Image (cartoon, coloured by chain):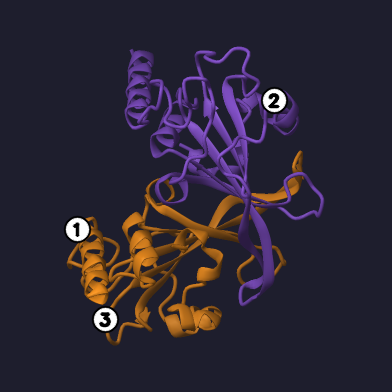
Chain colours: A orange, B purple
């Protein structure tokens, strides 16, 4: 009974996410077209839920910069209730340059100019078989600040999975850095 | 004419903020009672706008930790339009412990357990003269993770202004770390 209620609550939240999604070309995500092409969301900083942030300082490291991660409010609420990402959930990791300086609180780091965005879109139905941007239950995309309109990655196995392998047990998401997901 | 329109838009946004504020004991802020006692907001991580984050690594520095800063969506929207904080705007700076480790993106830092919260509430009317938590156009509060229900500061001049002096020209807020406020 409890399990049924949990599933019902999950379905309601998934529906809410889908309803808010303003689909373009399919009924699944406003950020994915009928061919599986992923676009960069535009309103995540002002309207979405902040999951958490990361800082990678080492020069030359693949993720050097200040990372801020966001998802739709309904997707975060669903995860807190079920421990699962609902179909169509979108994660955006915005990476900015690192700024540093002497602050009154101590030597500090903060975020500067945009560098890149990583986007993941949850796909529970295996919609885009054969499309290199889709696999392992997600769509994967990379957008560069110099050209925000094109996914710079054609192959998620080559461009994305290498970094995400340590998070396989948590559906490829590094949830340990996201306090907002704790129930 | 343009100035009038801008002022009208500003007033509308201020009204929207006030309407959303669910006042308790006054008509100004849901986080301030009639005596000027400030309480810690509870839903900022899931429902508010993330302005930006800071990291202070140095052991013993007054702000050591991972800082995430939030405000109400309407307050952020008003600031983007006018460059001013509307009356009743609330800023919450959540400070967590620093976690660190080897990540696939390079050696990284992220946020751990709660330490403290700093809260500022914009007051454009000088409502609480003689109350040490109010001055310089804001209410000021500090909450410790060990006791979230009591403002641990009795005197903002002593406990808050020392760190905020460098931000006087931007109404005591370190806006350079908040990309979400850029128009």
Viewer-proximal residue, B85 or A151? B85
CA separation, marks 1 and 2?
A: 48 Å
Report the quarter where the C terminus of chain A lies: bottom left
**Subunit bearing disc 2:** B
CA separation, marks 3 and 1?
A: 21 Å
Point 38% across, 24% down: residue: B14
Task: Give the SS element for disc 1.
Answer: helix
Point 49% across, 79% down: residue: A159
- Residue B147 drawn at (x, y percent): 61, 45
Task: Give the SS element for disc 3.
Answer: loop
The residue pinned by badge 1 equals A19
**Within-10-Å neighbours for mark 1: few <14, some 14–19, many 20+:** few
The residue pinned by badge 3 equals A128
The residue pinned by badge 2 equals B155
- Residue A180 drawn at (x, y percent): 47, 58
Q: Is residue B58 left or right of residue A131?
A: right
Viewer-proximal residue, B60 or A167? B60
């Amino acid at each position: 009974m409890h399990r049924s209620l949990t599933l019902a609550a999950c379905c309601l939240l998934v529906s809410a996410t889908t309803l808010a999604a303003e689909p373009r070309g399919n009924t699944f995500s406003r950020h994915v077209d009928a061919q599986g092409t992923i676009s960069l969301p535009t309103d995540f900083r002002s309207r979405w839920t902040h999951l958490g942030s990361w800082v990678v300082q080492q020069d030359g490291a693949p993720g050097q910069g200040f990372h801020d991660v966001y998802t739709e409010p309904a997707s975060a609420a669903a995860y807190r209730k079920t421990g699962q990402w609902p179909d169509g959930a979108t994660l955006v990791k915005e990476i900015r340059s690192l700024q540093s300086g002497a602050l009154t609180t101590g030597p500090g780091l903060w975020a500067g100019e945009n560098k890149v965005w990583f986007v993941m879109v949850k796909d529970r139905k295996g919609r885009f078989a054969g499309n290199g941007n889709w696999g392992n239950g997600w769509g994967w995309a990379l957008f560069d600040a110099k050209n925000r309109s094109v996914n710079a990655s054609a192959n998620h196995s080559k461009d994305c999975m290498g970094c995400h392998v340590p998070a396989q047990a948590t559906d490829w998401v590094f949830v340990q850095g996201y306090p907002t997901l704790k129930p």
